Image: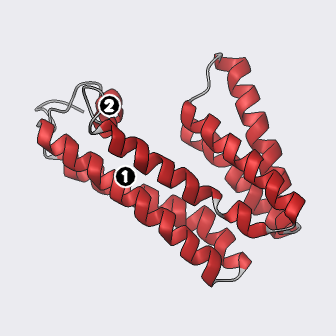
Amino acid sequence: MQALVDLLPVVLFYVAYKFSDFRTAIAVMMVAMTAQVALTWLITRTVHRMTLISAALVVGLGAISLLLHNELVFKWKPTILFWIFAIVFLGSQYLGARPLAQRFMESASQGGISVPARDWRVLNLMWVGFFTVVGALNLWVAYSFPEGVWVNFKLFGLTGLTLVFALAQAFWLSRHEAPGGS
Protein backbone atom coordinates (compact mmCIF):
# COMPACT_ATOMS: atom_id res chain seq x y z
CA MET A 1 0.00 0.00 0.00
CA GLN A 2 2.85 2.39 0.84
CA ALA A 3 4.28 1.92 -2.67
CA LEU A 4 1.01 3.17 -4.17
CA VAL A 5 0.98 6.17 -1.84
CA ASP A 6 4.59 6.93 -2.80
CA LEU A 7 3.72 6.71 -6.51
CA LEU A 8 0.74 9.08 -6.25
CA PRO A 9 2.73 12.37 -6.55
CA VAL A 10 4.42 11.03 -9.70
CA VAL A 11 1.06 10.08 -11.20
CA LEU A 12 -0.36 13.51 -10.31
CA PHE A 13 2.71 15.12 -11.94
CA TYR A 14 2.06 13.06 -15.09
CA VAL A 15 -1.66 13.94 -15.20
CA ALA A 16 -0.95 17.65 -14.62
CA TYR A 17 1.63 17.58 -17.42
CA LYS A 18 -0.78 15.91 -19.83
CA PHE A 19 -3.57 18.43 -19.08
CA SER A 20 -1.42 21.54 -18.67
CA ASP A 21 2.34 22.09 -18.91
CA PHE A 22 5.63 21.18 -17.27
CA ARG A 23 5.71 24.12 -14.86
CA THR A 24 2.21 23.33 -13.62
CA ALA A 25 3.17 19.67 -13.24
CA ILE A 26 6.18 20.66 -11.12
CA ALA A 27 3.97 22.79 -8.85
CA VAL A 28 1.42 19.97 -8.54
CA MET A 29 4.15 17.51 -7.58
CA MET A 30 5.57 19.93 -5.02
CA VAL A 31 2.14 20.28 -3.38
CA ALA A 32 1.48 16.52 -3.62
CA MET A 33 4.79 15.60 -1.98
CA THR A 34 4.27 18.15 0.79
CA ALA A 35 0.75 16.83 1.38
CA GLN A 36 2.01 13.24 1.35
CA VAL A 37 4.59 13.99 4.04
CA ALA A 38 2.09 15.95 6.15
CA LEU A 39 -0.65 13.32 5.91
CA THR A 40 1.75 10.46 6.57
CA TRP A 41 3.00 12.28 9.65
CA LEU A 42 -0.52 13.00 10.89
CA ILE A 43 -1.62 9.38 10.43
CA THR A 44 1.48 7.44 11.49
CA ARG A 45 3.55 10.01 13.40
CA THR A 46 6.52 8.92 11.31
CA VAL A 47 7.79 9.51 7.79
CA HIS A 48 10.38 7.30 6.06
CA ARG A 49 13.72 8.99 5.40
CA MET A 50 13.47 8.11 1.73
CA THR A 51 10.16 9.97 1.49
CA LEU A 52 11.61 12.99 3.28
CA ILE A 53 14.68 13.07 1.02
CA SER A 54 12.52 12.74 -2.09
CA ALA A 55 10.11 15.45 -0.88
CA ALA A 56 12.98 17.79 -0.07
CA LEU A 57 14.45 17.27 -3.54
CA VAL A 58 11.06 17.78 -5.24
CA VAL A 59 10.32 20.98 -3.32
CA GLY A 60 13.87 22.34 -3.48
CA LEU A 61 14.65 21.55 -7.11
CA GLY A 62 11.07 22.34 -8.11
CA ALA A 63 11.31 25.79 -6.57
CA ILE A 64 14.68 26.45 -8.21
CA SER A 65 13.37 25.18 -11.55
CA LEU A 66 10.29 27.40 -11.37
CA LEU A 67 12.24 30.48 -10.23
CA LEU A 68 14.90 30.09 -12.93
CA HIS A 69 12.42 28.97 -15.61
CA ASN A 70 14.74 26.00 -16.20
CA GLU A 71 12.99 22.64 -16.29
CA LEU A 72 16.32 20.76 -16.50
CA VAL A 73 16.94 21.55 -12.83
CA PHE A 74 13.84 19.55 -11.90
CA LYS A 75 14.77 16.73 -14.26
CA TRP A 76 17.90 16.14 -12.15
CA LYS A 77 15.77 15.05 -9.15
CA PRO A 78 15.58 11.32 -9.99
CA THR A 79 19.31 11.22 -10.71
CA ILE A 80 20.24 12.91 -7.45
CA LEU A 81 17.90 10.62 -5.51
CA PHE A 82 19.20 7.46 -7.22
CA TRP A 83 22.81 8.51 -6.69
CA ILE A 84 22.13 9.24 -3.01
CA PHE A 85 20.71 5.71 -2.74
CA ALA A 86 23.79 4.31 -4.49
CA ILE A 87 26.10 6.09 -2.02
CA VAL A 88 24.05 4.98 1.00
CA PHE A 89 23.89 1.35 -0.19
CA LEU A 90 27.63 1.40 -0.91
CA GLY A 91 28.36 2.91 2.51
CA SER A 92 26.28 0.20 4.16
CA GLN A 93 28.79 -2.35 2.84
CA TYR A 94 31.31 -0.91 5.30
CA LEU A 95 29.20 0.62 8.07
CA GLY A 96 26.87 -1.37 10.27
CA ALA A 97 26.46 -5.09 10.75
CA ARG A 98 24.49 -5.76 7.54
CA PRO A 99 24.24 -4.15 4.10
CA LEU A 100 21.02 -2.24 3.41
CA ALA A 101 19.79 -4.79 0.87
CA GLN A 102 19.96 -7.44 3.59
CA ARG A 103 18.12 -5.27 6.10
CA PHE A 104 15.32 -4.49 3.63
CA MET A 105 14.93 -8.02 2.30
CA GLU A 106 15.06 -9.74 5.68
CA SER A 107 12.40 -7.44 7.11
CA ALA A 108 10.21 -8.01 4.04
CA SER A 109 10.63 -11.79 4.08
CA GLN A 110 10.01 -12.09 7.84
CA GLY A 111 12.87 -14.53 8.34
CA GLY A 112 11.94 -16.90 5.48
CA ILE A 113 15.27 -16.40 3.77
CA SER A 114 18.79 -17.45 4.69
CA VAL A 115 21.48 -15.96 2.50
CA PRO A 116 25.25 -16.16 2.99
CA ALA A 117 26.89 -12.86 3.93
CA ARG A 118 28.86 -12.81 0.67
CA ASP A 119 25.63 -13.00 -1.37
CA TRP A 120 24.12 -10.13 0.62
CA ARG A 121 27.15 -8.00 -0.26
CA VAL A 122 26.83 -8.98 -3.93
CA LEU A 123 23.10 -8.15 -3.90
CA ASN A 124 23.81 -4.83 -2.22
CA LEU A 125 26.43 -3.98 -4.86
CA MET A 126 23.93 -4.90 -7.59
CA TRP A 127 21.63 -2.22 -6.16
CA VAL A 128 24.52 0.26 -6.10
CA GLY A 129 25.12 -0.46 -9.79
CA PHE A 130 21.42 -0.25 -10.62
CA PHE A 131 20.98 3.12 -8.89
CA THR A 132 24.10 4.49 -10.57
CA VAL A 133 23.03 3.35 -14.04
CA VAL A 134 19.40 4.53 -13.83
CA GLY A 135 20.60 7.88 -12.47
CA ALA A 136 22.82 8.28 -15.53
CA LEU A 137 20.06 6.98 -17.81
CA ASN A 138 17.70 9.66 -16.45
CA LEU A 139 20.21 12.37 -17.39
CA TRP A 140 20.68 10.90 -20.85
CA VAL A 141 16.92 10.94 -21.46
CA ALA A 142 16.56 14.44 -19.95
CA TYR A 143 19.27 15.93 -22.18
CA SER A 144 18.74 13.87 -25.34
CA PHE A 145 14.98 13.74 -25.83
CA PRO A 146 12.02 16.12 -25.84
CA GLU A 147 10.31 16.99 -22.57
CA GLY A 148 7.34 14.67 -23.21
CA VAL A 149 9.63 11.68 -23.64
CA TRP A 150 11.31 12.43 -20.31
CA VAL A 151 7.92 12.75 -18.55
CA ASN A 152 6.87 9.33 -19.88
CA PHE A 153 10.26 7.90 -18.97
CA LYS A 154 9.99 9.26 -15.43
CA LEU A 155 6.67 7.55 -14.76
CA PHE A 156 6.85 4.43 -16.89
CA GLY A 157 10.54 3.91 -17.58
CA LEU A 158 12.04 4.50 -14.15
CA THR A 159 9.16 2.79 -12.35
CA GLY A 160 9.26 -0.15 -14.75
CA LEU A 161 13.04 -0.54 -14.56
CA THR A 162 12.92 -0.48 -10.77
CA LEU A 163 10.14 -3.06 -10.68
CA VAL A 164 11.91 -5.38 -13.14
CA PHE A 165 15.18 -5.09 -11.22
CA ALA A 166 13.44 -5.75 -7.88
CA LEU A 167 11.70 -8.81 -9.35
CA ALA A 168 15.02 -10.07 -10.72
CA GLN A 169 16.55 -9.64 -7.27
CA ALA A 170 13.64 -11.51 -5.67
CA PHE A 171 14.09 -14.34 -8.18
CA TRP A 172 17.84 -14.40 -7.47
CA LEU A 173 17.14 -14.53 -3.73
CA SER A 174 14.44 -17.19 -4.06
CA ARG A 175 17.11 -19.86 -4.40
CA HIS A 176 17.84 -19.21 -0.71
CA GLU A 177 14.26 -19.47 0.50
CA ALA A 178 13.90 -21.68 3.55
CA PRO A 179 11.84 -24.86 3.06
CA GLY A 180 8.24 -24.09 3.96
CA GLY A 181 9.05 -20.33 3.99
CA SER A 182 7.02 -17.78 2.12
- Hey, what amino acid is under mark 1? Ala
Q: What residue type is disc 2 on?
A: Arg
Horizontal side of 87 relative to 43 (left or right) equals: left
Across and down, in percent, residue 134 comes to 46, 64
Q: Residue at x 63, y 35 (%)?
A: 52
Q: Is residue 21 above or below residue 119?
A: below
Picture quadrant of residue 106:
top left
Q: On the picture, is 171 further left or further right than 31?
A: left
Can you tell which mark lies on residue 103? 2
Image spot of residue 168 (x, y percent):
29, 57
Q: Residue at x 57, y 71 (%)?
A: 139
Quarter of the image for the C terminus: give it.
Answer: top left
Of 95 and 126, nearer the camera is 95
CB under 8 Å between discs 1 and 2: no
Circle 2 SS class: helix
Residue 42 figure quarter: top right
**Residue 133 drawn at (x, y percent):** 42, 65
Neighbour tally class for label 2: few under 14, some 14-19, many 20 plus, Cα within 10 Å: few
Q: Which structural element holds mark 1? A: helix
The scheme the figure's colours follow is secondary structure
Q: Is residue 172 left or right of residue 104?
A: left
**Number of other residues with Cα within 10 Å of mark 1, as a class: few under 14, some 14 to 19, many 20 or more:** few
Query: Residue visible at 68% across and 54% down?
Result: 10
Q: Which residue is mark 1?
A: 166
Can I make out residue 46 in this image?
yes
Q: Earlier in the sequence, mark 1 or mark 2?
A: 2
Q: Can residue 1 be seen by looking at this rendering?
A: no
Q: Of circles 1 and 2, which is in front?
A: 2
Residue 89, given in percent of the width and then of the height, sits at: 37, 43
Q: Which quadrant of the rendered structure holds the N terminus?
A: top right
Instruction: Give how far apart the Cα atoms at labels 1 and 2 are.
Output: 15 Å
